[in-house]
Amino acid sequence: MKTLMTLLTGVVMASSLATAQANEVVVGGKNFTEQQILSSMTTQYLEGLGYDVDKRAGLGSAVLRQAQENGQVDLYWEYTGTSLINYNDESAEGLTVDETYQKVKELDAEKGLVWLEPSDANNTYALAMREASVEETGITSLSDLAQAVNDEQGLTFAMNAEFYAREDGWRPLQQAYEFRASRGDVKRMDSGLVYQALRDEQVDVGLVFATDGRIPAFDFQVLEDDQNFFPAYALTPVVRQAALDANPELAEQMNTLSGLLDNDTMSTLNARVDVDKTSIERVAENFLEENDLL
């Protein structure tokens, strides 16, 4: 009888311990490829560590942020510029990547949100050229590009209509770098078509997003923004303070994952989904396995 009671006590204790270790974490994600990869990656990673994960992916940016502020989502990957400009109504003008991170970290702490260690992935606007054109012209930065335009080298550009018209878009970019392209040298089109036009040599320069998978797939090179014109959009895990209090090891665990991500890595992962048509779950799983996190 004593042996049976001891056995039952051990089972109850083990069950209680398993329950304590399997704290639920609600992982959110936005509704585009990069975010879907990250939400799947985070879910698989945390489940492998013993967490009970509830994944709520595919949400709009504003809806997801509101859900986190309301306590419905514990953790998701956000971009520093998005929080600073869209959620905190602050300007990012002239701020470096680190300054943007520090500012948004301070502002969101007041709302009970903790910005963990930022990755080296910065999914900001960028201008890109074909690698062959870069080699031919020697243009590697936006200052080089401005000089080429001012030297009347006849470069043509493709960008979406929003960037062309917005107050912090094409016109102020030209002012910042002191060049002026003629209206006829700029073709406005859907963002997705920009990549095709650049690849097919219909234009010389295209507006892209820095971690888009088509950049490596189409042999593009992003030009250095050497005057920090574009806002920083450093990809960072953001978690509710309450969730960290309940799961003290979560910060270090997510920082480990964040430390593995940079522009080249995210571009490659995005390309595997958007170009190679590999499933999001498989891409995320392979990445974790390759880095011994699963």
Image (cartoon, rainbow, N blue to C red):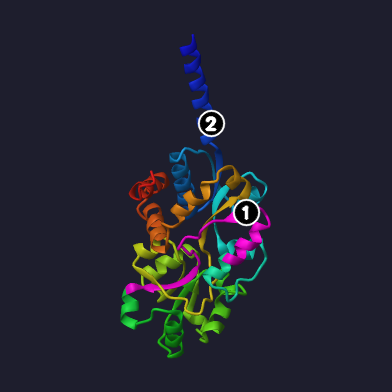
| Closer to us: 193 or 219 | 219
- Location of residue 75 in the rendering, given as x and y in whole percent from the top left corner: 56, 48
* Badge 1 amino acid: Leu
The residue carrying mark 1 is: 113
The residue positioned farthest toward the top in the image shown: 1
Q: Residue at x 38, y 48 (%)?
A: 288
Please provide the residue range marked out in magenta.
102-131
| Residue 104 belongs to the span the image colors magenta | yes
Residue 19 numbered mark, or none:
2
Left or right, residue 221 beside residue 172 = left
Query: Helix, strand, or loop for circle 2?
Result: helix
| Residue 118 belongs to the span the image colors magenta | yes
Left or right, residue 144 beside residue 230 = left
State the separation of the CA atoms marked 2 and 1.
26 Å
Up/down of 170 relative to 52, above or below: below
- Location of residue 190 in the rendering, given as x and y in whole percent from the top left corner: 50, 65
Left or right, residue 229 beside residue 194 = right
* Badge 2 amino acid: Thr
